Amino acid sequence: MQNTIALVSLSAIRRNAVRLQRAAGGAPLIAVVKDDAYGHGAVQVALAIEDMVAAFAVCNVAEGAALRLGGVTRDILVLLPPVTEEEAARAALYGLVVTVSSPYSARLLCRAARQRGVSFRAHLAVNTGMNRIGFRPERVATACRRLEGSPVCIEGIFSHFYAAEDASAREAQTALFRRACADAGRVYPHLIRHLAATGGILAGAGLQFDAVRPGIGLYGYLPVPFQGALPLLPAMKVYAPVVQSGKFTGGGIGYARATRAYGSVSAVRAGYGDGLFRRGLFGAEGNLCMDAHVREGGLRAGRYVCVLDDAAAYAEAHGTIAYEVLCRVGEAAERRYV
């Protein structure tokens, strides 16, 4: 077999969940498993921690449906609102909790409910400053009054920090969120309120509300401003096979002219087609090819070598974040669970 292999430790993810919940003062977890659990495999991760969490969160209806088909029974919140009636109907079919984020999504859900004879459980998204999705706080009261008595039952309300490490921005967003919760609570008095993701959990007390939404922390990494704030265990290591080794004969390393002499070199079956970055990989000589890279030294053909064990360090070297590295590499690899 010549695939890259991602070994995913489900026990590490469980331990990370425990540490995050302790950091959140025991608040229930809405575990974020969107984008195939950041490349770790959403169904396998969800089943491994289902007994530890209150609910899961995904990006879209298709992801939620895949969890249901995989045997997940906990509540599944779809963080982005449906954009078609067919998508909304599919959410109802699989018993997903949908997001209402605008007058458009509210009308779409009401229309889909009437035409298909279904009802929706929903959370209200509030835009407190990230300016991605959500009602403006001053519009929340009107939105709730219009939805009252409709087939769209609002059970929760949420927002998202755009800079959890910035105390002034965090405080401003929290104040807006509290205002929105109070307005919504006059119509729906028993809402599940959630604001903090991984960064918010680590930003301090008073942000937990009724639940927290850890994402990247589950997989062993922290947002850059919070690195080192909590001892987490990276859950994924990626390995690739050596396909050939031999004496260096001069010339190039991959597509580039060699800048020095080598004794022997080895070709490893992992390149930028596997989600790695072309310009450099720890242990590689020169740029990566699409499906391979060259390492110094004579390695035994068929042996598997680790090509990624620290997504944060690799991301920093390439001017990005661990989230992107994990999604790219995890998607391309054959995943095995330990």
Image (tube, rainbow, N blue to C red):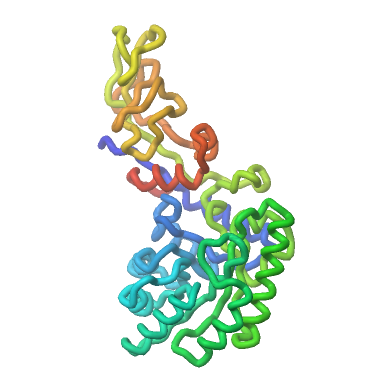
Q: How many marks?
A: 0
Q: Residue at x 65, y 67 (%)?
A: 27
Point out the residue furthest to the bottom here.
149
Please name whichever residue, 114 or 296, is drawn nearer the observer in this view of the structure.
114
Position of residue 244 measured from the top left corner of the image (x, y, whole percent): 27, 21
Q: Decide if residue 34 is on the left or right side of residue 206.
A: left
Q: Residue at x 51, y 86 (%)?
A: 147
Q: Quadrant of the N terminus?
A: top left
Q: Decide if residue 40 is on the left or right side of residue 130.
A: left
Please name whichever residue, 76 or 135, is drawn nearer the observer in this view of the structure.
135
Please name whichever residue, 192 or 16, is drawn nearer the observer in this view of the structure.
192
Q: Residue at x 60, y 56 (%)?
A: 162
The answer to whether residue 148 shows anywhere in this view is yes
Position of residue 45 measured from the top left corner of the image (x, y, whole percent): 44, 57
234 to 14, vertically: above or below:
above
The image quarter in which residue 228 lies: top right
Q: Decide if residue 87 is on the left or right side of residue 182.
A: left
12 to 290, vertically: above or below:
below
The answer to whether residue 310 shows anywhere in this view is no
Position of residue 222 measured from the top left corner of the image (x, y, whole percent): 59, 48
Position of residue 35 measured from the top left corner of the image (x, y, whole percent): 41, 56
Q: Decide if residue 14 is on the left or right side of residue 120.
A: right
The image quarter in which residue 284 lies: top left
The image quarter in which residue 272 lies: top left
